[in-house]
Amino acid sequence: MKKNRCASCGGTLVAQKICYDKKVGKRMFSFEDVPALVCSACDEVWMDGKTVEKMEKILHKGLKPTRWARVPIWSLSRAA
Ligand SMILES: [Zn+2]
């Protein structure tokens, strides 16, 4: 097996589980525990086709999310 190299800078790719936000239209969908290769030099994220396909399948089927995350919301009318 040859070492994984970043296609944009030639840096070393490290296998990690990442959080990934995917924007579809105006909605944001968040995935966690996404297997990806992250470049240790430029932080570029590389995912294989199967992973991307899996996320698309989840969105397409409208599967129930693992959990709901609260997002922080700031109201400008109450700003200091
Ligand atoms: Zn890189």
Image (cartoon, helix red, strand yellow):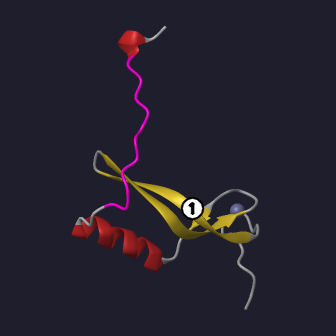
**Residue 63 location (% of width, % of height):** 26, 67
Instruction: Tell me the chief SS of the magenta region.
Output: loop
| Residue 68 drawn above or below residue 62 | above
| Residue 54 drawn above or below residue 31 | below
Amino acid at circle 1? Ile
Q: Residue at x 36, y 51 (%)?
A: 68
Residue 60 position by quadrant = bottom left
Quarter of the rendering occupied by the N terminus: bottom right
| Residue 55 part of the magenta segment | no
Residue 45 position by quadrant = bottom right
**Helix, strand or loop for disc 1:** strand
Instruction: Give the residue at mark 1.
Output: 18
Give left or right: position of 37 versus 5. Answer: left
Please give the count of numbered marks on the rendered protein: 1
- Which residue is at the front of the view, 41 or 16? 16
Number of other residues with Cα within 10 Å of mark 1, as a class: few under 14, some 14 to 19, many 20 or more: some
**Residue 71 location (% of width, % of height):** 41, 38
Magenta residues (range): 65-75
| Residue 55 drawn above or below residue 24 | below
- Which residue is at the front of the view, 35 or 48? 35
